[in-house]
Image (spheres, grey):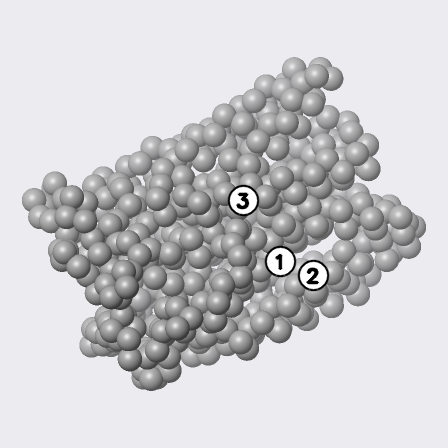
Amino acid sequence: MLQLFGYDQGVLGAVIGLDSFRREFKDPNRNQEGIIASIYDIGCFVGAILAFMTADRLGRKGSICVGSWIMVVGTILQTAATEQIQLIVSRVVTGIGNGMNTVNVPIWQAESFKSHNRGVSHVLTDSSTWGHGANGLTQAMLIIQSALIAFGHPLSTFMGLASRQAEPSSFGWRWPIAFQGVFLVMILAFLPFLPESPRWLVQHGRVEEATDVFARLSSKDAVITDPAVLAERDDVVASVEEEKRLGSASWGEVFTEGPNRNISRVLLGAGPYMFNQWSGINSLAYFLPITFERNIGLSTQLSLIIAGILGIQYFFVSWLPYFFIEKVGRRKMLIWSSAACSFCMVMIAIMLRIGSIPCQWVFVAFCFLFFDVFSLGILPVSWMYASEIMPLRTRNKGVALGVSSHWLSNFVVVYVTPMAIDNLQYKLYIIWAVLNASFVPITWLWYPETARRSLEDMDEIFRHERFGLTKTRSPGTRTKEGGDGVIRRRDADVEVFADEGKDLPTLDTVRR
């Protein structure tokens, strides 16, 4: 799912400089390079919009299965392409499937995990171990998905490096593209063994199945009669019944504020997705070997080697949020990551402007550091935040709009990068530095903290806070269950909404 996004970010940059690729596609110019690379993101945008049409009808698993099969078709067409137009169309097809999956996976995750480990389970996309039972399998699936956003970079780069040995045969560029199919086989093989979203099951009247899933996700030894399992189910049933009483959400409702602050949540949910792209990450990631070649004059082989090593470091560093994402919270991670990314881009621009041999290697070093600090905050938060703040009633449409903003931003960034490297040079990185710096006050002022809060908690927060300066700046107080199946809160951590003069409704003990 998300792993193909990571792999595809790097694979085109790894093969686009090969003589066999350039000969096959009539030596594309900078504009054509941008179109070939970025058109994938237009497909992802279309897929994100289509996702809301399938998610409610087919379920989260069913929609992911459809998206994955579409990607299989696209991968076959890409591998067989002999003309630019064939390559462009096939990348659109692959993008449609990936766009569908990048909407459904975060929703599936948010609806399946408990509030005190939902963020951890998402970072399991970057870092975790295999667990037990259905919960472990679900976490393992999430590892396979998002971890390869990071792992896909070095894999695709080293694929490109190895494929150079096949030159001048077209196998040199076809094999790295075809290798995407290996990931798809893994996804389609694991998917039947994973549980459907229990919230989706409740929404469609399949309460007994949902109870079984809650038990499977609770622990290895849990049974459907456990008090914690029944409390979890009853909470969700009550929430879904209230949503059904109000009726299905229309697009008009999604773009209306109302008591649930729908449009506010859509805008806030889209923000981190856009932060991800406008940080400049894919200006580097899609064309990293080319960046080293064209900016500082390294050879193709050395550029591929350095890009591969950078990707390996990126992958390992992306595991670290596992240890602190719930304790530190989304806001702090996003703020500090954005500030650090801005600093790295400033240093990259300065080193490129000076242009001496030592500065060229400092440029490389700050590229390494940029990927590291990006993976410690912007990367994990951007993919989880929207699904954590959207109400169940509008979640499909809201998350689809957020992911769509991600892919449109990705398209613009990737399309302009080949031309910007030549024409703007160091000034391109100043633009990224300014944008990253702007994320800091935006996050501080408007983004409520979601860590250790259930989806129902976030509903309460948005009902009490008006659109504007948020007062919810610290992680919530839900902690792991005790032996009695009760999730406890500490009285000292009750949130106070100064503008309302009210406390967020809490109990000494809260049953989910």
Q: Residue at x 23, y 44 (%)?
A: 472
User: Which residue is at the front of the view, 88 or 482?
Assistant: 482
Q: Amino acid at mark 3?
A: Ser
Above or below: residue 39 compared with residue 348? below
Residue 342 in percent (x, y) is at 48, 29
Q: Measure the C-alpha gap from mark 2 to mark 3.
A: 21 Å
Q: Mark 2 Cα within 10 Å, few/some/many (few <14, many 20+)?
A: many
Residue 274 in percent (x, y) is at 45, 45
The answer to whether the residue labelled 2 contacts the one labelled 1, judged by CB atoms less than 8 Å apart, is yes
Q: Amino acid at mark 2?
A: Gln
User: Which residue is at the front of the view, 5 or 375?
Assistant: 375
Q: In the shown orientation, is residue 265 left or right of residue 502?
A: right
Q: Image quadrant for the C terminus?
A: bottom left
Q: Residue at x 90, y 52 (%)?
A: 166
Q: Residue at x 36, y 37 (%)?
A: 332
Residue 153 visible in this rendered orientation of the protein: yes
| Mark 3, residue position | 318
Q: Please tell me which of labels 2 and 3 falls first in the chain.
A: 2
Element carrying mark 3: loop
Disc marking residue 4:
1
Q: In the shown orientation, is residue 455 left or right of residue 191?
A: left
List the single residue furthest toward the front.
Answer: 483
| Mark 2, residue position | 180
Q: Measure the C-alpha gap from mark 2 to mark 1.
A: 7 Å
Disc marking residue 185:
none
Q: Mark 3 Cα within 10 Å, few/some/many (few <14, many 20+)?
A: many
Q: Residue at x 77, y 27 (%)?
A: 297
The quadrant in which residue 308 appears is: top right
Residue 339 in percent (x, y) is at 44, 30
Give the number of the mark in front: 3 or 1.
Answer: 3
